[in-house]
Amino acid sequence: METTVANRLQNIKASLPLHVTLIAVSKTKPIESILEAYTSGHRDFGENYVQELVDKYAQLPKDIRWHFIGHLQSNKAKYIVPFTHLIHGIDSLSLLKEVNKQALKNNKIQDCLLQVHIAKEETKFGFDASELEDPATLNTLATFSNIRIRGLMAMASNTNDTEHLKAEFTGLKTLFNILKTHAIPNLNMEILSCGMSSDYPLAIAHGSTMIRIGSSIFGEREYKH
Ligand SMILES: *Cc1c(COP(=O)(O)O)cnc(C)c1O
């Protein structure tokens, strides 16, 4: 049988534990491929670039749950807050403040994940664990009335070293559990978003509840922004 986007997606989905949500990462992929996944019943899609997300949102069915998984610049939050289901890449309090402002304007509570820097690479965005364990950070977070933090997001190192990856995922899960003990009304630690095409089984084994899969569903990306 020919493997199509829908086949690949449904095969991965069928292999997942029930508590794990699959985000189909459609960045750089055409509307037709997204529609193929949509028609097979999928509703959660992830995009990395603001303009691309805005364009796709306009063209696609309105019951899609859009996940913004890229690096968000504060001045662009206003374009995606009106319709985005979950913003994964919150990597600073100043960004969170701006998202809160836009959520207030749109009369919505914006669900967000805090991105944690777990990889050894310098280039990856996110909070350090120590910043999130700092009471000052959590106290500021508590003042954002239109934000609901639903959990954490991370990208592990780009390596085949399983032991190294395990250590990163374990550290993330430990931080998740620590944050879970805080009684802050808008901090609801339920989601751990980690795991991509190359490492998602290991991520799930270490507590991930949301995986972001691009190339294993849509094929390799032809170009990068
Ligand atoms: C592109 C991307 C993914 C998906 O990567 P694949 O290796 O294609 O599965 C997941 N998360 C983030 C943040 C991404 O930018």
Image: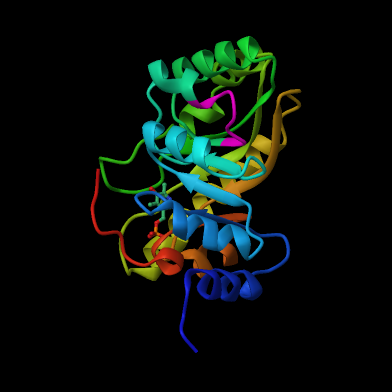
| Above or below, comparing residue 132 to residue 213 in the picture | above
Considering the whole magenta stretch, tell me its main secondary structure: loop
Colour theme: rainbow
Q: Going 54% across and 44% down the picture, which residue do you hit?
A: 60
Does residue 7 belong to the magenta stretch?
no
| Nearer to me, 130 or 61 | 61
- Please report the bounds of the magenta region as a residue range: 80-86
Residue 111 versus residue 185 in the image, above or below? below
Q: Position of residue 74 (x, y in %)?
A: 41, 18
The foreground one among 141 and 220 is 220
The one nearer the camera, 128 or 195, is: 195
Residue 152 locus on image (x, y percent): 56, 41
Residue depicted at x 47% and y 75%: 4
- The quarter of the picture where residue 148 lies is top right
Q: In the displayed structure, would residue 168 be above or below residue 91? A: below
* Residue 83 within the magenta-colored segment of the rendering: yes
Q: Quadrant of the C terminus?
A: top left
